[in-house]
Image (spheres, rainbow, N blue to C red):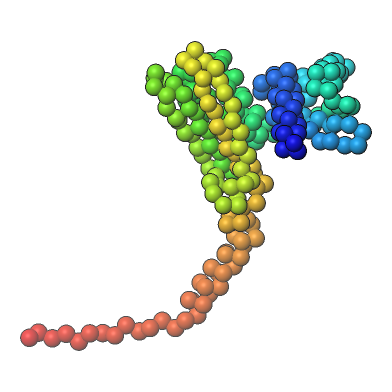
Amino acid sequence: MEEKKFVTFKKEELGVREYVKRELGKGRISSANIEYTPVGEKIIIATSKPGLVIGRRGEKIEELTRVLKKRFKLDNPHIEIREITQPKLDAQLVADEIALSLERKGSLKFKVIAYKMLQEIIGTGALGAEIVLSGKLPSERAKSWRFAQGYLKKTGNPAEVVDRAMSQAVTMAGVVGIKVSILPPDAPIHDRIVIDDKIKNHLSASLIKVDKVEEELPKKKSKKKNGGNK
């Protein structure tokens, strides 16, 4: 019985998250997490466009709160907005933006969309990024295309800091699957070597010392070879 209650509880929680994302629109929401407090449920919505999510004088938030309370039987839902200042470093927002671009411009321009987005991600300061598109691109046979740049961990503990997300684009040719992986600029990489000004100055001082030592060493006299005609 406890297992069934837990599964039902998680299904309802997933329904709340999916409803919030669908209601506020694709490309606006990165995540919607639920935290349970003694005074009620706190729903934390991460978005790069808080003004569009809140609405004029908080109308959208009030309407969303009423629906969550009535439809999902939440006791006292409280919605909290967390603003994302760097949307190009958020994998879910990037995946949704690629999906919207494919739906709007068509699947034939998937290379232009992917390369442009990759440049914007790296330009924001990401250490590495990878975009994988799967679907009928551009032929009738399904195929996967991979676009990558920079440094990206695949395995081990450092791979856990990689932000990963998935999305889907519904085009005329069919559904296109989108996978995005981004390594943020502040990710702790243990085997990463950063050559800063301190290391450069230390190397320069070491080279100067080596040059001075070589100058002070006495030069060896070259031995003349006595050659004769045989």
Q: Residue furthest front?
A: 1
- Which image quadrant for residue 140? top left
Specify whether 88 is left or right of 118. right
Residue at left 88%, top 37%? 37
Quadrant in which the C terminus is drawn:
bottom left
| Residue 10 visible in the displayed image | no
The quarter of the image holding the N terminus is: top right
- Within the image, what quadrant is residue 45 found in? top right
Q: Does 118 appear above or below 227? A: above
Which residue is rendered at x = 45% and y = 30% of the image? 145
Q: Which of the two residues, 112 or 38, is positioned nearer the viewer here?
A: 38
The percent coordinates of residue 220 (x first, y second) are 38, 83
Residue 167, can we see it?
yes
Q: Who is closer to the viewer here, 179 or 124?
A: 179
Query: Is 21 located above or below residue 147 in the figure?
Result: above
Report the side of 224 relative to 37 (left or right): left
Tell me where residue 71 appears, x and y as whole percent.
80, 18
Furthest toward the top, the residue is: 172
Q: Quadrant of residue 55?
A: top right
* Residue 172 locus on image (x, y percent): 49, 12
Please report the residue visible at 41 percent of the width from the left and 81 percent of the height from the top.
219
Residue pushed farthest left?
Answer: 230
- Figure label count: 0
* Left or right of 79 in this view: 166: left
Residue in view at x 60 percent, y 52 percent: 157
Q: Position of residue 101 (x, y in %)?
A: 57, 19
